[in-house]
Image (spheres, rainbow, N blue to C red):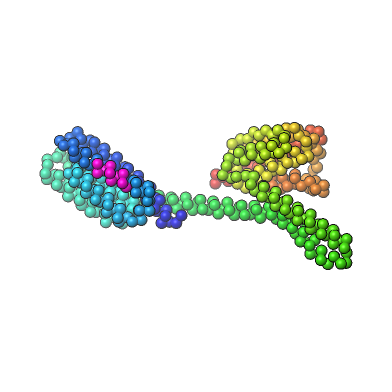
Amino acid sequence: MTPPANRVVAAASLGRAVLLGRAALTLTATGVGLRVLPDPRTALAVSVVVVVSTAAGLVVLAHRPDVVRHSAGVVAADSVAVLAVLVASRGGVPFFCFAAGACALGGVLLGMRGLVLWVPHAALGYWVAGHLLRTGAPSPHIAVFTLAFPPADVLAGIAAAVATGALVRYVDLSVDVVASAQRSAAASERARLARELHDSVAKTLRGVSFAALALPSSLRRQPELAEQLASTVSRGAAAAAREARELLTGLRLDSPDQDFTATLRRICDRCAESSGVAVRLTAAPVDPPADVRYELSRILDEALRNAVRHGNPRRITVTLTRTDRLRLRVRDDGDGFRVPADFSVLTAGHHFGIVGMAERARHADGALVVTSEPGGGTTVEVSVPAECLARTAS
């Protein structure tokens, strides 16, 4: 949204507020006048003019807010309404109220340039006040009240111009903050995708490329080696395709615009449906930053897959709690295993799940703990410090 567009939004919003406030003030003054006016038709005529002009202005601003760009035309049309109220009220208090509202509307549309409107309105107000004082014998209180209204026109215009400028600056700042957050989120998403590609598909494709480069020179000299290299290329391509599918599936696990608990429940329900194992979720209402909730979603998915694939469980319990840390715990009643002191030992047997979960926990500035005994089930717990969660509030 460009700055001129921001001013359109601010002016249209404040313009509607001014129209409604002016109508309420003028109709109140008209209603009070019903008790002292000898002819109620005067009050009725004023009410009709006020209601019709206000309704027309509200409709135009609601359907065509960009009309505020043509401020001169709007001010001219509103000045006609002011003159109509003057004629209908015969210079009574409703006219002064309506004129003050017109100056406020001019301040919204013209800013401090509204001085060219406020001065004529104030001069007209003094002329009307002088006419009323010459043709009647009002009390001193009424005289002071009538003479005080013309300066109020200028004050109302200045106040509206200042309020509009402040609102425009606020809208500009809000737009800048949202745009900055969107840019930051896009950069974070690109960095995360780049890391995922580097840690999985890129490494596999690099191995495939090395094997493919050695394949032509080996075809004639070492046919057996060429056959092995061709097999390596085939397996590597299949592995890269599988990793790409897993990567895309993982990226779709979390929807940042949805509640985090709903994301966890969807992952648990999908595991239960595909494996037939009962998965129970208990989650505290938390909303971690996008990068943290992404890593936690991937860890939960991997932990559930490992439990089903290797543990033969009957039941899996997933809990998400928050105290001084955010803790995601996955507990199963399966076969269990003996946990090595160093997770990297597991990679020798091509078991990369726990290693990958530990890496994801570190990416979220957290830590992964795995506890298990043969026949005693397995518990996977990842905890993230509260300072990481505070990033959502910054």
Looking at the rendered structure, the number of numbered marks drawn on it comes to 0
* Residue nearest the observer in this picture, 334 or 106: 334
- Residue 340 picture location, percent across and down: 80, 42
What residue range appears in magenta?
48-57
Q: Nearer the viewer, residue 318 or 134?
A: 318
Using residue 203 as the reference point, say whether residue 152 is left or right of it.
left
Regarding residue 301, the answer to whether it shows in the image is yes
- Residue at (42, 53) in percent of width and height: 6
Relative side of 333 to 252, left or right = right
Q: Please tell me whether residue 54 belongs to the stretch shown in magenta.
A: yes
Relative image position of residue 9 (x, y in whole percent): 40, 51
Q: List x then y, in percent, for residue 351.
A: 79, 46
Q: Position of residue 15 (x, y in %)?
A: 34, 48
Camera sees residue 166 = no
Q: Residue at x 19, y 43 (%)?
A: 89
Q: For residue 191, what is the image quadrant?
A: bottom right
For the point 87% across and 63% down, the residue is: 223
Is 42 covered by the magenta stretch? Answer: no
Q: Relative to 384, does residue 119 appear above or below in the rendering? A: below
Predominant SS along the magenta part: helix
Relative to 371, 269 lies left or right: left
Q: Is residue 175 left or right of residue 310?
A: left
Residue at image coords 25%, 51%: 79
